[in-house]
Image (cartoon, rainbow, N blue to C red):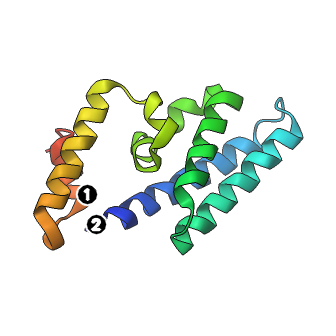
């Protein structure tokens, strides 16, 4: 996948399915909390589709998950923590941040011909 935004949109869509399944299978959590999280997930997804105000909503969503559903935290894709940035960066290790910074540098240096997915695999030692 060439485009950086499209790559993250695809990761978010997969993550969204996983989170919805988790919320539906977590009866031990307060119904209102689950509903508020589901609503925030839907708002974030819509904002991503429209490409407006998605960063703030994504930060709120991921921070909410860490604070309200800590058992789900390991299922949050690391690339979404990087993509949404802000307070989400606190949940990444220093070596992860360095790799993501390297990835961003390579992506922007490569210009229009950059394949984000391929560059990510290189930066994270996947090939």
Q: Position of residue 42 (x, y in %)?
A: 68, 60
Pick whichever, 64 or 119, lies toward us.
64
Pick whichever, 105 or 75, lies toward us.
105
Q: Horizontal placement of 105 versus 9: left or right?
A: left
Q: How many marks?
A: 2
- Specify which label sits upstream in the sequence, 1 or 2: 2
Mark 1, residue position: 117
Disc 2: CA contacts within 10 A as few (<14), some (14-19) or many (>=20): few
Q: Position of residue 73 (x, y in %)?
A: 56, 31
Disc 1: CA contacts within 10 A as few (<14), some (14-19) or many (>=20): some
Above or below, comparing residue 58 to residue 47 in the picture: above
Q: Horizontal placement of 9 versus 120: left or right?
A: right
- The disc placed on residue 1 is 2
Q: Which residue shows up at 59% across the image and 66% down it?
A: 47
Q: Which residue shows up at 74% across the image and 51% down it?
A: 38
Above or below, comparing residue 89 to residue 71 in the picture: below
Looking at the rendered structure, the secondary structure element under dot 1 is helix
Query: Where the N terminus falls, by quadrant?
Result: bottom left
Q: Horizontal placement of 31 versus 21: left or right?
A: right
Quadrant in the rendering for residue 107 = bottom left
Quadrant in the rendering for residue 27 = top right
Query: Where the C terminus falls, by quadrant?
Result: top left
Tell me, yes or no, whether the two marked residues, 1 and 2, touch with CB atoms within 8 Å.
yes
Q: CA–CA distance between discs 1 and 2? A: 5 Å
Above or below, comparing residue 82 to residue 89 in the picture: below
Pick whichever, 34 or 60, lies toward us.
60
Q: Horizontal placement of 81 versus 94: left or right?
A: right
Q: Position of residue 65 (x, y in %)?
A: 64, 36
Q: Which residue shows up at 15% across the image and 68% down it?
A: 111
Q: Position of residue 53 (x, y in %)?
A: 57, 62
């Amino acid at each position: 996948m060439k485009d950086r935004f499209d790559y993250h949109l695809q990761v978010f869509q997969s993550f969204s399915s996983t989170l919805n399944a988790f919320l539906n299978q977590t009866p031990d959590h307060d119904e209102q909390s689950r509903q508020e999280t589901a609503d925030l997930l839907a708002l974030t997804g819509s904002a991503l589709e429209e490409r407006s105000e998605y960063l703030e909503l994504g930060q709120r969503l991921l921070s909410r998950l860490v604070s309200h559903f800590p058992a789900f935290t390991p299922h949050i894709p690391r690339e979404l923590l990087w993509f949404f940035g802000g307070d989400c960066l606190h949940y990444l290790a220093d070596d992860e941040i360095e790799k993501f910074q390297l990835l961003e540098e390579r992506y922007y240096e490569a210009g229009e011909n950059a394949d984000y997915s391929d560059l990510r695999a290189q930066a994270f030692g996947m090939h």
